[in-house]
Image (spheres, coloured by chain):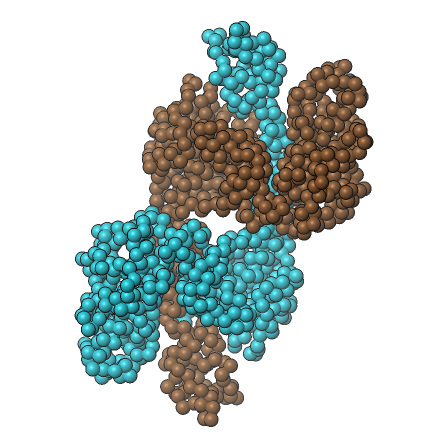
Chain colours: A brown, B cyan
Amino acid sequence: MRKIYLYNIPRRQALQRFLSAVRLPRRIEKVKTAGALGRVTAEPLFARLSMPSDHAAAMDGFAVRAERTFTANDRNPLQLLPGEECLPVDTGEPLPPGFDAVIKVEDILMLPDGGIEILAPATPWQHLRSVGEDLVAGELLLPALHRLRPHDLGVLLAGGITTAAVLAKPKAVIIPTGTELIPPEEKRHRGDVPDFNSTVIAAYLQQWGAETVIQPIVPDDQALLKEAASQAAAEGDLIIIIAGSSAGRSDYTVHVIEALGEVFVHGVSTRPGKPVILGQISGKPALGIPGYPVSAYLSLEWFVRPLIYRGLGQPEPARERLRASLGRRIVSEIGVEEHVRMAVGCVDDRFVANPLERGAGITMSLVRADGLLIVPAESVGFEQGETVELELFRSSGELRNNLLAAGSHDLIVDLLATALKEEGTGLTLSSAHLGSMGGIGAIGSGQAHLAGVHLFDPASGEYNTPYIERLLPGKKVHLINLAYRVQGWIVPPENPDGVERIDDIASKGISFVNRQKGAGTRILFDHLLEKAGLTPDEIPGYEREEHTHLGVAAAVSAGTARIGLGILPAARAFGLEFIPLCEERYDLLMNDHFYRSGAGEAVLKLIRDPVFQKRVEAMGGYSMRDAGKLIN
Amino acid sequence: MRKIYLYNIPRRQALQRFLSAVRLPRRIEKVKTAGALGRVTAEPLFARLSMPSDHAAAMDGFAVRAERTFTANDRNPLQLLPGEECLPVDTGEPLPPGFDAVIKVEDILMLPDGGIEILAPATPWQHLRSVGEDLVAGELLLPALHRLRPHDLGVLLAGGITTAAVLAKPKAVIIPTGTELIPPEEKRHRGDVPDFNSTVIAAYLQQWGAETVIQPIVPDDQALLKEAASQAAAEGDLIIIIAGSSAGRSDYTVHVIEALGEVFVHGVSTRPGKPVILGQISGKPALGIPGYPVSAYLSLEWFVRPLIYRGLGQPEPARERLRASLGRRIVSEIGVEEHVRMAVGCVDDRFVANPLERGAGITMSLVRADGLLIVPAESVGFEQGETVELELFRSSGELRNNLLAAGSHDLIVDLLATALKEEGTGLTLSSAHLGSMGGIGAIGSGQAHLAGVHLFDPASGEYNTPYIERLLPGKKVHLINLAYRVQGWIVPPENPDGVERIDDIASKGISFVNRQKGAGTRILFDHLLEKAGLTPDEIPGYEREEHTHLGVAAAVSAGTARIGLGILPAARAFGLEFIPLCEERYDLLMNDHFYRSGAGEAVLKLIRDPVFQKRVEAMGGYSMRDAGKLIN
């Protein structure tokens, strides 16, 4: 059953092949104009009625017959009788029959009998809106294939078009596959994977203008999948099969599409997104979409978005482009077009873009992404500091107010992100977990506004300052205390291995999970090892690295490790035992430009805010006694 | 009852006063995550579960125990027994207990017994996704006040958040007022005005994130309006009263808001949009919005859009800005900030912006607008050719493909606009009705790509060419025939005045409606007058001008004129009598750059397309016998 990719062709070529082979139907439906916002006109729409439909007053005042007023001037005031010679009118009111001009209220002396006195004649048709001044019967109001905006509904209703012929939304049928899948609302057991992809895919398609139906989950069974796909082809305009698009043991999608229709493309030379299938069933576009979330959403965007926009006759909205300096080197394989999610901010008045996690399974990389860097197939990547062009997910205006936080991961930085929004500062915050050493480096090279650091220097007994002096000599930076926090051993509930001291890990051979190189917690662990006279090769699992406290706790919780070093809230998140070890200082390092900016002030103000401090301390394991204190 | 404006203050100052006095409430509601697209988080959302929740294969292949594989190398192939020592796994599958590495299918020799042979050892944790690699329990998934995008729904579901706390949509209650109003679907009688404003306003508010309720139409009666407004304040978060915001006879809105609450601002120094009322009822923002559509929508955008975005804690999306050359002079009053709707295109590789109709009642000016030019209060306007900065309604990328048509109005040009969309050319077309002479001028000054002209030259008996030679000497342009069309008298059904010749208008004193100066049809009329030995002052209504054929027909249909000169389709649109007079040539004048461009080719191809030609001839009064022929 295992088979290799049929093709492995460039993305644009794949799209061309797909679009030249299939298209979505253009069905017409009649809808109430009042409910047609966002729909696309199926035919040119001409006004049936004029607006205004009568001559109407364009000013508040009195309607008159112009001819009757010709003798009025400031030496010969003219009085007009109410009813026969003048009638009050408000803006928009139709002119009484026989009247042909309006005199503004400001140019009138009102008489007790309801008549008026004027000092100047009216010219015929003055201060009137003529019939059809806004729109006139027979006029083209909107062309075909026009997406209806709010004021378009207005002109249609004004022109007497109360039902409009619009294009029916193409109907996409989404088929989630995989024996391991369960509906996302169900309780998970070991091995269950929630099917969140269907919801996300449906949401994307709806945004682009399609109607969606999600079929029940199909287990990995070729016959069942075939049945589901035929049914989808009978009921929908577009079939999307999620997962099983690769060449694995239970990847039946390609066989099913082949059996029921035709496969045009299997595999494109991109990363992520390679194992996509483009084909047709009963002449209807049918896609096999990879199960990895990032691959899934990127391939939707490459192949389904253009299909839907074309079907509706609309130009695909282009993303804003931005040139930015690359914060970290990106290495990419020749022959593969790579799509790297990027965090983007404006540091020292210069846009900087930092690559996020590149794995196709990391949905959070899409959540965190401010933009996309496309590394062409013929490129081996880009060097740090190189200027690259990005496609933005958020506007460059917004990204000007996006703070880049680097360095050590701490939940307080996350709380800071949410508090900045709640305070209405207009600031957002993107966090990269680079570890304390990485954070100092990022501040040094202008890749971040601020970085969390907690580096103990055994020689001096001091935190952070010695490292900064050594790594950023002569650079003007500012160090501000954020919190003191307790580091300790994270072990299974009730500490089954009876860990008391670091020696126990070596002597009892307890499986350890470490943090990545450059992380403050790892440096702390190495210091503890040295103090205990131990070497790394005495610690089983020393080489296994996690990038966050929560990652360490997750490993202990899953039972793949029995001990790790980290902070209390991480242990708590998984209901694990926490054995306190020492209190450490966690500071924020800021570059000078940011420190002096309004944004820097807003961050400091927040850190010093007692409400914020209480919120942090409520998590447990933190002391905010010096929060906001300038260290140097 | 008549009163003057309470204030007349700058727009930004009015907004500041309004926003500092009122705000929308932030109510929290729980919604199913799957249906929460576009909603705004009410609190930071942390993962409850990890994803993956078990160690899972990151590749298709076999799960192994790394320790068992250490002896494998290419001189010592190692065989592993199925079940105990190796198990097949596909990407995403959880690792069987006790196994700690995956070997890729490509690195394996499959054995008949279901076991495998390998030539290299596996390192522990290779090709695995660890627990929480995508997201880990306790991790901040999304901050508060974050608008949910499709992939955000994915991480929430993956993290076990199946219901999310989001901000309730603020509820706006819209009150249409005016005795003349009828629901837009109802049949209109004399004096009836369809209430399309409510629909448009509701659509805008929904786009911005509010929920809307439209109350029944309230006639001009202060007590009834007061009742409606109190009820709205009881049920909604935001009250919008449409019309009656001015200072006319039946403008009760300001009195009602004053009586029930407080008026902060009445009147802002803008055009359109001046008579707006900003206030509160029961502490809830209450607005009186002008009844003129353009004023209504602009004031919504100035005052309601920021209110809603602030309420939801979101930045207001900024419009793209574009610098363009002004096609025609704009004169504006000092002390008034004017918002001019503009048509924008790229002529000769240079962006050009032409002002559209400036009346507050012309909804079509919003439909036609590609952008907005704001003339500051302290400015008297801009000169033709000056560079101005616009706020765009469509992207500059799209506008690069927007054709500017100037000159004489003809329905064929409208059909061309719709056919260009239907053909999928990616081109759109904005039409300005400047008359034939205006069209030649626009081509001469680079304000338009193409212009419709039909100018008879009595001296030579020729059409168009003599005018172009005289007005654009030495300029390289191209003249292409679009159609021949019949001009004739447009009169009421059955020609009650018995018009036969132009002399009848003068001798019988039949009330005439003329076209604007520079229009080909007016030049034709003047020529006919001269030929008949008549002068303008012998024609009653000669000074009354309409800008289109349909406008002339509308005036005759409404009975405010008894005769006009125009084309057959206009007469037909109103069921009027048409007395043919002569056939005239209607050409398209193109500038050289456009003529040679791909867009120019697309237009020519369409004009020469027999399907398009049949569609035109079906309207009546047209001959396409030379359509697309190059005249010079």
Residue A286 as seen in the image, left or right of residue B461: right
Q: Quadrant of the N terminus of chain B?
A: bottom right
Which image quadrant for residue B78?
Answer: top right
Which image quadrant for residue B247?
Answer: bottom right
Q: Of residues A10 and A286, which is closer to you in this image?
A: A10
Number of numbered labels in the structure image: 0
- Residue at 54% x, 14% y: name it: B87
Residue A547 as seen in the image, left or right of residue B483: right
The x and y percentages for residue A611 are 75, 47
- Residue A500 visible in the picture: yes
Q: Is residue B368 above or below residue A115?
A: above
- Residue at 64% x, 54% y: name it: B25
The x and y percentages for residue B249 are 52, 77
Q: Quadrant of the C terminus of chain B?
A: bottom left
The x and y percentages for residue B593 are 32, 55
- Residue at 73% x, 36% y: name it: A468
Residue A416 as seen in the image, left or right of residue B152: right
- Residue B140 visible in the picture: no
Q: Of residues B507 and A489, which is closer to you in this image?
A: A489
- Residue at 65% x, 29% y: name it: A547
Q: Looking at this rendering, what residue extends furthest in the top direction?
A: B76
Q: Is residue B63 above or below residue A460?
A: above
Q: Of residues A470 and B136, which is closer to you in this image?
A: A470
Q: Looking at this rendering, what residue extends furthest in the front direction?
A: A474
The x and y percentages for residue B282 are 65, 63
Q: Is residue B213 above or below residue B47?
A: below
